[in-house]
Image (cartoon, rainbow, N blue to C red):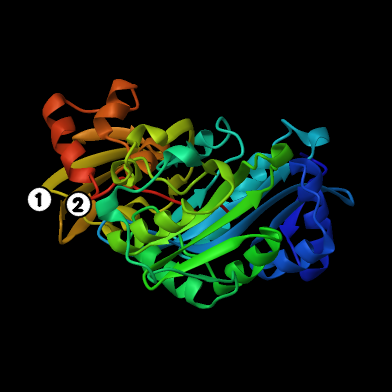
Amino acid sequence: MASISTRVATEDDFDAVVRFDGQLFGDVWTEEQRIAIRPLLELDRFHLAHDGDALVGVAGLFSQELTVPGGATVGAGGVTWVAVAPTHRRQGVLRTLMDDVHADVDARGEPIAILTASEGGIYERFGYGVATHCRLVEMERRRVQLRPEFQPPPGTVAMTTGDDPRLFELFDRYRRGRVGEIDRTPASFTSAVVLNGPGASVAIHEDGFAVWKLTPKWNGGHPAHEMRVLDVVANTPEAYRALWNTVLSADLVGTITSHRQLALDDELPYLLTDPRAVRTTDLNDMLWVHLRDVRRSLAARTYATIDELVVGVDVGDKIERWQVAGSPEGADVRRARRRPDLSTDRASLGAMYLGGVRPSTLARAGRVVADADVLRRADAFFAADRLPHCSTSF
């Protein structure tokens, strides 16, 4: 590391950063796409590592908001575009860049850092825990149909375009009501028109929208196009049913795939005449959570039961002890002097923070230490109304 220096990016670094990211992640950006992504990047939150004049590492941040149990939105630094040149692996470059982005998060008063990971074995050592999961789903169009009682009346859904300003407003309402979701900016919807490529279809309901894209498969006169569902955003059960009814009504479709749209506790199978038609083909980690400021993070959410627990957290260089007095109305979190009821590490606390991972599950894995009665109470205490879900990659 003696020859490695780090600094914050400037506007002049945009081309180099995009080129570096494309080389390491295998993306080939067209000029139109480069123009589309520029408004999304906060270059003053991108940290660069150089070996002499050569760019050898990048780690950036987005200024985001995360919805936590109880409906509060908490400022979060979204770690993104993390890459190290293959010539400089295992030389401390990643560690230095992560230290830089965490210092940036702390300086801006964001109590939480979040990320989505290209590989699952990298970020736990930096204090990140898997708080939501990504469910990959496949359906055969001929087998999926809404039950008759759930089919909406005609006229509830219309087609629109990806730059419709209502999409931002509908998503913003949705993400504030769904634990685990993060915000999207108006610019992200504008950029998505380009990044999704030509041919994306957008359907809108007064309480939601859906986006999908077809890959033609004509099969010599036996069409079975592949549909990739990119978004289903619904603020009411009626909107959810109507939008899925529209998606499933597309002609000439064979296989339908969804990468991030169906939550682990999604209701879609129960709306169909054949619930087995919704097949989960893979299950991956999605949102990783790192509580930079443990006290503020724990105080930002509500709790499902009225209880009080002392939580001991190994944050790397010390053990913090926090007395959490919580209820469905809020929480009071302060320093504790007595022995913890529950002890864990920062990554495991991040995993259970949104209510998607039970403390008892982590205890069985040896990641949480508490007696059986405390685990029973903690499972109920940290639970959310629904499993947390994040449909937005970054």
- Residue reaching furthest to the bottom: 165
Q: Give, as a three-letter code, the residue at label 1.
A: Ile
Residue drawn 19% across the image and 58% down it:
332
The vertical placement of 43 against 84, above or below, is: below
Q: Give, as a three-letter code, the residue at label 2.
A: Tyr
The vertical placement of 323 against 36, above or below, is: above
Residue drawn 42% across the image and 68% down it:
157
In front: 360, or 158? 158
- Residue reaching furthest to the right: 53
Give how far across and how far down residue 202 sits, in percent: 54, 64
Disc 2 secondary structure class: loop
Q: Give the numbered dot on residue 306.
A: 1
Q: Give the numbered dot on residue 303.
A: 2
- Graded by Cα atoms within 10 Å as few (under 14), some (14 to 19) or many (20 or more), the crowding at tag 1 reads some
Q: Is residue 208 visible?
A: yes
Determine whether, in the image, residue 376 is placed left or right of residue 119. left
The vertical placement of 162 against 101, above or below, is: below
Disc 1 secondary structure class: loop
Q: Quadrant of residue 10?
A: bottom right
Quarter that holds the C terminus:
bottom right
